[in-house]
Amino acid sequence: MPAIFGDRMVVQQDAKIPVWGWADPGELIQVSLGQEQKQTQANAQGDWRVEFDSMPATTPPMTLAVGGRNAIEFHDIAVGEVWLVSGDASDQSHLIDESNGRDLVAQPADPNLRFYEAEPRPGIRPKSLGGGYWHPAAMPWIQNTGVCAYFFGQQLHQSLNRPVGIIVAAYGQFPIQGWMSKEALQKLPDADKWLADIVARDAIFPRDPIQQKAAMDDWGKRLNNWDQNQRHPWMAAEAGWAKARDAAIAAKQPIPPEPQSLPPPPRNPDGEPGDPTVLFNGIIAPLVGFPVRGIVWDQGQANISDAQQYKAILSGLIHDWRGHWHTNVPFLAVAANVPHSSSVQAIDPGPINTFHPPDKPALAKHLAAASLHAVYGQ
């Protein structure tokens, strides 16, 4: 089953609850959620899916049990409000890094505020399984939760007085094109500029899982060889040159030539984080179909060179994600001013000459206020 299904997960209230996974073709699958039960059969490809009726947020914590030739159970499942927080800002600063971080993480655990931390796994093709885990607002997990995601979820939880689950799908400072599907990128001007290389690499990356593992193992060996035999010696040479440079400057002598640049590491055959489509494929695609109330998007620093086209590109991403979720899901975009979405100004919570506003709690409060107004009518 996809990693999004797990202990302590939150499912969206007042919406159909889909559950899906994989088994042997033709295998009978029994699924129960609380007192509700469903039965289905895996198709010829091994895919199976059931759908439970919507439930209110007052539902007590439940167990999700799936049985076939194998059995699995997920416990302490809550029904409430689920939001997806994505982009890059939530990956830049963690709660423990705040000036009062130690006090924040030492607060009493809140069992009804929960987070899913999606693992940053790029993929040259859309993935199904994904990686990640659910955790409550409690130590030791909460210290590494993104500041913006935490305070956004906390504000919603306090205002709505119901369980809240925040899916954190954020990674570094990479271009928005990495968060879009190949089909969406193909609709943009200059699509070939973004897609030519990734399409060529997709064509040579194996499709057989065993061959994929062999390719990844080979890359790991080559990466380790690069690290040991090129990066480490280069770092030592750089350090030696820096000392020689300083000594030459002090002695008013010519500065010796700097060592040659470090050769780049071998490229991951399953995609590098900065490549187009790979963050959608590896992080977002495994989440598609899991119902969410809305999406928060905070990204753009890596697209400064595309500033004139950014709104159009972001509009394409919004349309792309809504199409994959098959719903006109509310979208909050930080300072984007994109039609058919809500925007939040991120300048006032900090100096404008920083890549990310330093006052993340203030930004989160803006986002929560926008969601409470636009989505919940408050």
Image (cartoon, helix red, strand yellow):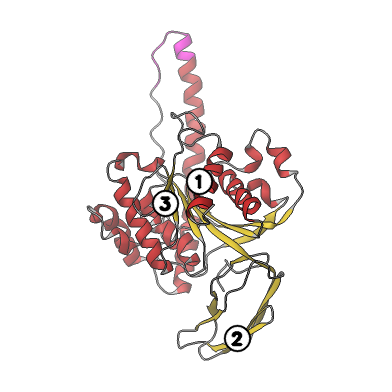
Residue stretch in magenta: 247-256
Residue closer to the observer: 132 or 8: 8
Image check: 259 left or right of 143?
Answer: left
Pointer 3 local density, CA inside 10 Å: few below 14, some 14–19, many at least 20: some
Spatial CA distance of label 2 from label 3 is 47 Å
Which amino acid does the dot numbered 2 rest on?
A: Lys
Numbered badge on residue 227? 1
Q: Is residue 126 left or right of residue 28?
A: left
Q: Mark 2 and mark 3 in contact? Answer it, CB < 8 Å.
A: no
Q: Which mark is residue 266?
A: 3
Decide whether residue 253 is among the magenta residues.
yes
Question: Which type of secondary structure does the marked residue at label 2 adopt?
Answer: strand
Was residue 355 drawn as part of the magenta stretch in this picture? Answer: no
Q: Earlier in the sequence, mark 1 or mark 3?
A: 1
Which residue does the image show at 49% across and 56% down from the upper left? 375
Residue placed most toward the observer, 52 or 267: 52
Q: Residue furthest top?
A: 252
Disc 2: which residue:
38
Check the image and report above or below for 225 versus 214.
Answer: above
- Name the magenta segment's main secondary structure: loop
Answer few, some or many: residues within 10 Å of disc 2's Cα (few below 14, many 20 plus, some between 14 and 19). some
Is residue 270 among what the camera can see? no
Q: Amino acid at mark 1?
A: Asp
The percent coordinates of residue 254 (x first, y second) are 38, 14
Q: Amino acid at mark 3?
A: Pro
Left or right: residue 334 compared with residue 144: left
First in sequence: mark 2 vs mark 3 = 2
